[in-house]
Amino acid sequence: MDNFYKELGKRINYYRKASGETLEQLGKKIGVGKSTIRKYEKGMIKVSHDRLEQIAKALDVDVSLLYGEEISNDVVDVPLYGSISCGDGAVIFEEKEGYVTSPKDWVDKGLYFYLTAQGDSMIGAKIHEGDLLLIQRTEEVENGEIAAVVVENECVLKRVYRENGSFTLVSENPNYKPIHFNPSTDKNIRIIGKLKKAITQF
């Protein structure tokens, strides 16, 4: 199979993962088995234009992106951090692991970064260990929003509930108890952003 279909397959794979779809889910949407989607992504079989339009519609992207037309104008590199700490009230982005190429319309306003989900405390929100978490940098979140919070030298992802200046961090797993904080006394605690998107890694 020529390089055109291999490159096409790479873009199908990229946008499928970016949308959070599994091979099976995408296959069901367009009426084929997951093995066929896998073959498309590996460039093992040809993809007709009609089929490509079905895939684009299922992934909610313009078909031109799958063809690779002007793709460089529609994506942006967003930093992925492996370590974030909080010392003396200041947030320190310590370890940049690289960049994640993302659709530009995901990050149209504000500053963004990625973290990698750890543990199982947010499985009730369908966030699993290893998922890529797109975070918009902000210290202000609404009650009940999922936020990235730096506690001492650890960055955690929790639902945040504010009350009278303090806030409570709540997991999406009954095995974890809520954590209560008062920013006026607990100095090394900062909300650094809110979750915009979780991308499952396969």
Image: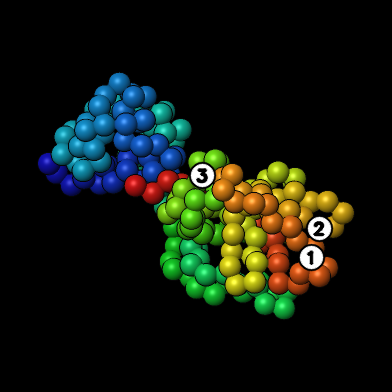
Q: Is 65 placed above or below 30 here?
A: below
Q: Amino acid at mark 3?
A: Ile
Going 18% across and 33% down the picture, which residue do you hit?
Answer: 46
Rate crowding at label 3 as few (under 14), some (14 to 19) or many (20 or more) other CA atoms within 10 Å. some
Q: Return the residue at label 2.
A: 166
Location of residue 12 by image quarter = top left
Disc 1: which residue: 183
Mark 3, residue position: 123
Q: Would you place residue 18 above or below residue 78 in this image?
A: above
Q: Residue at x 44, y 62 (%)?
A: 99
Q: Earlier in the sequence, mark 1 or mark 2?
A: 2
Where does residue 174 sit, x and y in percent of width and height? 59, 44
Q: Residue drawn 30% across and 21% down? A: 31
Residue 165 location (% of width, % of height):
85, 57
Residue 52 visible in this rendered orientation of the protein: no
Query: Which residue is most to the bottom?
Result: 88
Please tell me the numbered disc located at residue 164.
Answer: none
Q: Amino acid at mark 2?
A: Ser
